[in-house]
Structure formats: structure tokens, C-alpha cells
């Protein structure tokens, strides 16, 4: 299934996966434990989690946490053909 990113603005402290899962009733297969809780803006106390798209409706603002999203999580890949390695460039320059 597709995963989406959710941003949590925590007014007090850094939220843990356990707190997030408990507060929103997320099952272990709905939240990406390997992704974890990623701090994206320390000054604003913003954190991102990665969850299954079907579970996004469970995550709503609370008294201590504001929520935004869901946001798309597109794969990151190169554009066009891969670059030649330094070794290939050096060989060509030397005419090898």
C-alpha cells in the first residue's frame, strides 16, 4: 500500500512512535517504524512520520499536537542516464 507523510507540531517535547501510535490508535503495520519520528524543524518543534495512506484519517490535531498533511511520499530517483564514474572519465581523457 502507499505511504504518506504527516507532520506533527508538538507543543511539548519530542513525540515517540509509541506515543503517536497510542494517541491515534495506529497498528504496527500502519506506521513505518524504520522511518521513525524525524525532526524537520527544531525551532518550530515539527516532526514527520510515515504511515499507510488508509490510516491518515486517524491522525487529527489534539490539545498538545497540531497536525498537517498527509503529504505525498514519491520515490527519489535520478533523472536521465546515470553519470559516468570518475574512472571512466579519466580513461576517456587519457585516450584509454
Image (cartoon, helix red, strand yellow):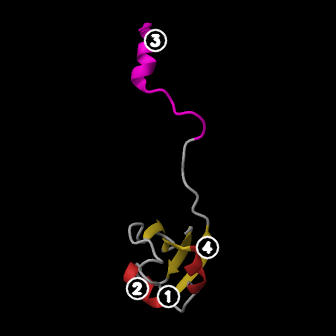
Residue at 61% from the left image edge and 65% from the top image edge: 72
Residue at 41% from the left image edge and 14% from the top image edge: 91
- The residue range painted magenta reads 79-96
Per the image, the residue denoted by label 1 is 24
Disc on res. 70: 4
Q: Is residue 48 left or right of residue 87?
A: right
Mark 4 to mark 1 CA distance (whole Å): 14 Å
Q: Is residue 40 visible?
A: yes
Residue 31: % across, % down? 46, 76
Element on which disc 3 rests: helix
85 drawn magenta: yes
Mark 3 to mark 1 CA distance (whole Å): 59 Å
Mark 1 to mark 2 CA distance (whole Å): 8 Å
Please state which of the two labelled residues, at mark 1 or mark 2, is closer to the viewer: 1
Q: Nearer the viewer, residue 57 or 16?
A: 57
Q: Dot 1: few (<14), some (14–19), or many (≥20) neighbours within 10 Å?
A: some
Per the image, the residue denoted by label 3 is 93
First in sequence: mark 1 or mark 2? 2
Per the image, the residue denoted by label 2 is 19
Q: Is residue 41 visible?
A: no
Residue 75: % across, % down? 55, 55
Residue 73, image quadrant: bottom right
Element on which disc 2 rests: helix
First in sequence: mark 2 or mark 4? 2
Mark 3 to mark 4 CA distance (whole Å): 49 Å
Amino acid at each position: 500500500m502507499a505511504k504518506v507523510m504527516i507532520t506533527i507540531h508538538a507543543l511539548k517535547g519530542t513525540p515517540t512512535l509509541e506515543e503517536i501510535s497510542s494517541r491515534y490508535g495506529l497498528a504496527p503495520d500502519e506506521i513505518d517504524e524504520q522511518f521513525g519520528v524525524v525532526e524537520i524543524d527544531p525551532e518550530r518543534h515539527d516532526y514527520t512520520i510515515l504511515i499507510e495512506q488508509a490510516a491518515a484519517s486517524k491522525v487529527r490535531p489534539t490539545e498538545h499536537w497540531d497536525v498537517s498533511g498527509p503529504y505525498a511520499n514519491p520515490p527519489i530517483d535520478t533523472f536521465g542516464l546515470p553519470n559516468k564514474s570518475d574512472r571512466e572519465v579519466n580513461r576517456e581523457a587519457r585516450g584509454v
